[in-house]
Image (cartoon, grey):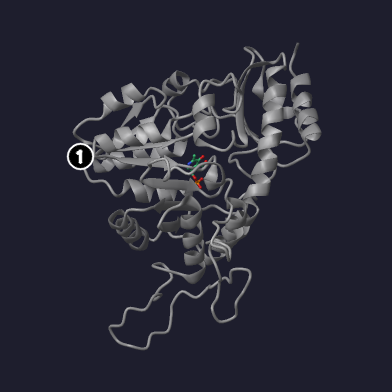
């Protein structure tokens, strides 16, 4: 969408206006929630745009076209969770196929590959996505895709999306990027060469810890048709009400993320100075190994950071003293959340593999919210003060 002079809108404006007018009858400014499961038909054998809400629903379609436009894609599909979106994309593959994934992929993605897709003889191998030569060498006859996040969860490792996508294409494989952490406001994987973008929209896109949702965006018409076939056949679509909540959340994405980034950057610098902190992982810190790639391919470090407490400091004692920051799974919402990946989000990964990944029992992940920075520092300081000197 562009303004009257055909000058493309900035993303801050597109977040509100990319979907254009909503309902053609009433000209709603806010997306109407179409709860109907079915639609009146008049011509036998006709092909109505909507016939049954599992296949298509007007509220969901508004969201799908909106998100596709934001990601710079032609086709968007909304699922009932990020995992439903990931499962649908992995369902594109057939027995004997194999997918490459990074060594610190989201725990749920690892779980569905290890304990679900393996049953259908769709395999996976783990690669270090920071080593492009190793990724290149890892492709084999069976490899059909490279599925990765950047930055990764929870260690904020940065992957070079353009370079990795080129490598995948060289091997006639798909480059699939989980863009949950940075969202189209900060990073556009399709423009960098990826074929498919996935979201857990539960996180930043929703932004208020009140909707579980997943999205898939892509440009290839044939692949899009297959994703849509999987969506309507397996029925993992997003409900009209949740589609509305996401449309509503997306409007404020830019202002939320701007504040989250400024808080996260300030906290990252502050955490580096804390004696009880061994190490800080945040890709907008110059000391971060992925700093240069992050600066080149994204518009900021995002709102997520992690840190290791020093050896012997008890994460439980740290969490016990917090009064503002909530100990909870998930991330990306307006309120700050902390989690202990080893026992929470990444508990489904075997301990040995977790240790190899660098997810130690000292690691704490912080999803930075939009609270006042001084209150956040004061709360984390309470946690550090509760650790023996
Ligand atoms: C990067 C990433 N991808 C996918 C998911 C799964 O999304 P959902 O919880 O919406 O199913 C998560 C959830 O934490 C995630 O962090």
Residue 293 x %, y %: 49, 28
| Mark 1 C-beta to ligand 1 under 8 Å | no
- Can residue 193 be seen here? yes
Q: Quadrant of the C terminus?
A: top right
Q: Secondary structure at mark 1?
A: loop
Residue 354 x %, y %: 46, 23
Counting other residues with Cα less than 10 Å from the Cα at mark 1, is it few (<14), some (14-19), or many (20 or more)?
A: few
- Can residue 238 be seen here? no
* Residue plotted at (45% across, 22% down): 357
* Residue plotted at (25% across, 43% down): 120
Q: Compared to 25, does 340 lie above or below? A: above
Q: Compared to 13, does 359 lie above or below? A: above
Instruction: Give the quarter of the image for residue 121.
Output: top left
Q: Is residue 384 left or right of residue 289?
A: right
Front-most of residues 27 and 152: 27
Residue 158 x %, y %: 48, 29
Front-most of residues 330 and 222: 222
Report which residue position mark 1 lands on: 96
* Residue plotted at (36% across, 25% down): 132
Q: How many marks?
A: 1
Residue 36 x %, y %: 50, 75
Instruction: Give the quarter of the image for residue 100.
Output: top left
* Residue at the extreme front of the image, as rendered: 5
């Amino acid at each position: 969408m562009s303004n009257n002079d055909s000058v493309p809108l900035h993303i801050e404006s597109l977040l509100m206006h990319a979907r254009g007018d909503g309902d053609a009858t009433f000209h709603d400014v806010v997306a109407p929630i179409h709860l109907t499961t079915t639609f009146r038909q008049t011509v036998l054998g006709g092909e109505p745009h909507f016939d049954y809400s599992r296949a298509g629903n007007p509220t969901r379609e508004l969201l799908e076209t909106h998100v596709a436009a934001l990601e710079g894609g032609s086709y968007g599909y909304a699922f009932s969770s990020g995992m439903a979106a990931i499962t649908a994309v992995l369902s594109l593959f057939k027995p004997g196929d194999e997918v490459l994934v990074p060594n610190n992929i989201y725990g749920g993605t690892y779980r569905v590959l290890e304990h679900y897709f393996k049953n259908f003889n769709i395999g996976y191998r783990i690669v270090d996505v920071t080593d492009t030569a190793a990724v290149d060498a890892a492709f084999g006859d069976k490899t059909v895709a490279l599925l990765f996040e950047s930055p990764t969860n929870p260690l904020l490792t940065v992957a070079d999306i353009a370079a990795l996508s080129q490598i995948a294409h060289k091997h006639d494989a798909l480059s699939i990027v989980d863009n949950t952490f940075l969202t189209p406001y900060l990073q556009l994987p399709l423009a960098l060469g990826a074929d498919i973008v996935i979201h857990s929209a539960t996180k930043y896109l929703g932004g208020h810890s009140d909707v579980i949702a997943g999205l898939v965006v892509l440009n290839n018409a044939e692949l899009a048709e297959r994703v849509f076939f999987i969506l309507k056949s397996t029925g993992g679509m997003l409900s009209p009400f949740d589609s509305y909540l996401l449309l509503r959340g997306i409007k404020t994405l830019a202002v939320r993320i701007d504040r989250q980034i400024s808080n996260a950057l300030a906290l990252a610098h502050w955490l580096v100075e804390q004696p009880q902190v061994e190490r800080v992982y945040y890709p907008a810190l110059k000391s971060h190994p992925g700093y240069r790639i992050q600066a080149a391919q994204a518009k900021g470090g995002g709102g997520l950071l992690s840190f290791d407490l020093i050896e012997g400091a008890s994460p439980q004692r740290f969490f016990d003293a917090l009064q503002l920051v909530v100990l909870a799974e998930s991330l990306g919402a307006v309120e700050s959340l902390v989690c202990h990946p080893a026992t929470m989000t990444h508990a489904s990964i075997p301990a040995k593999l977790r240790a190899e990944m660098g997810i130690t029992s000292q690691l704490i992940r912080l999803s930075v919210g939009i609270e006042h920075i001084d209150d956040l520092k004061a709360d984390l300081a309470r946690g550090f003060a509760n650790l023996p000197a």
